[in-house]
Image (cartoon, rainbow, N blue to C red):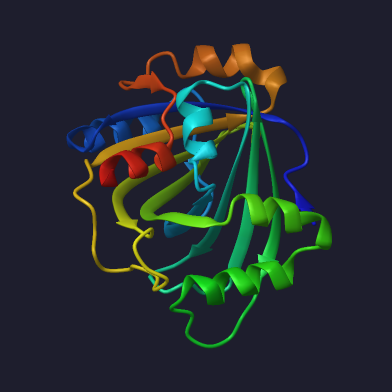
Amino acid sequence: MNIDASLRREIKFVANEFFVIQIRSWLETSRLGLRKHFPDRIVNNIYYDTHSYDAYTDNLDGISKRTKLRYRWYGSSQTPVAGRIELKSRLNAYGAKEFYSVNFSGNVTKHTQLFRSIKDSVPPEWDALLDFYSVPVIYNRYHRSYFISKCKRVRVTLDCKHDVMDQRMSNSINTYKKANSPQYIVVEVKFTPDLTDYVSSMVADIPMRISRNSKYINAVNSVR
């Protein structure tokens, strides 16, 4: 098992895509002294939920302790390739992540194929979790840019060019029929809790509004 070791704080900012030039300008001149951390890449996720949408409703209801399950892979392939199954946990303002690598060969086009590979890659103690969050609901993908602060303790990502595809209608993984979803920019600032005051002061001038944004919630809303 891999664990994103410590609890972290995450501040999210959202803006219309028309403001991307201003946002990139802020990233280049931020008092955090940001620089590129990794090459840009495409992030792909299939989100799982219960038949009664527990993960979705917990988020909307503002439940302080909640979890979210997704399969994530990177790159231009819209058909799932080797990646990892991630469990994101949140308690109030703090988050943590557990994940397992998932490897398979061949062309995976069915949800049952993918879920079988996921189950084969996790320990038995995850069985109940996978049985609970067993419904593939959404496939979303977006372009992500990565930055890190001069002190190397604050990570910032910029997400744009979002695509959403409903997965509830068929066992076949829908990679082509896109929902009519709004285009927006998300900046996420990630850091350990002891840096809260410092980070808050450093990002006070960002030309975006702070938000409880959830890409999963936005994606579900776009297909309901």
Up-down: is 53 above or below 40? Answer: above
Up-down: is 92 above or below 15? Answer: above
Spot occupied by residue 68 in the image (x, y as percentages of width and height): 58, 42
Up-down: is 93 above or below 182? Answer: above
Q: Tell me if 220 is positioned left or right of 189 in this view.
A: left
Up-down: is 41 above or below 152? Answer: below
Q: Tell me if 113 is positioned left or right of 121 in this view.
A: left
Spot occupied by residue 191 in the image (x, y as percentages of width and height): 63, 29
Residue at 67% x, 30% y is 8
Spot occupied by residue 199 in the image (x, y as percentages of width and height): 56, 19
Residue at 75% x, 64% y is 122
Spot occupied by residue 29 in the image (x, y as percentages of width and height): 39, 29
**Relative to the observer, which residue lies in front, 111 or 101?**
111
**Relative to the observer, which residue lies in front, 104 or 127?**
127
Residue at 57% x, 56% y is 134
**Relative to the observer, which residue lies in front, 23 or 130?**
130
**Relative to the observer, which residue lies in front, 4 or 194?**
4
Q: Quadrant of the C terminus?
A: top left
Q: Quadrant of residue 92?
A: top right
Q: Does residue 126 appear in this view?
A: yes
Residue at 71% x, 60% y is 100
Q: Quadrant of residue 97?
A: top right
Q: Does residue 46 appear in this view?
A: no
Q: Quadrant of the N terminus?
A: bottom right
Residue farthest front in this picture: 52
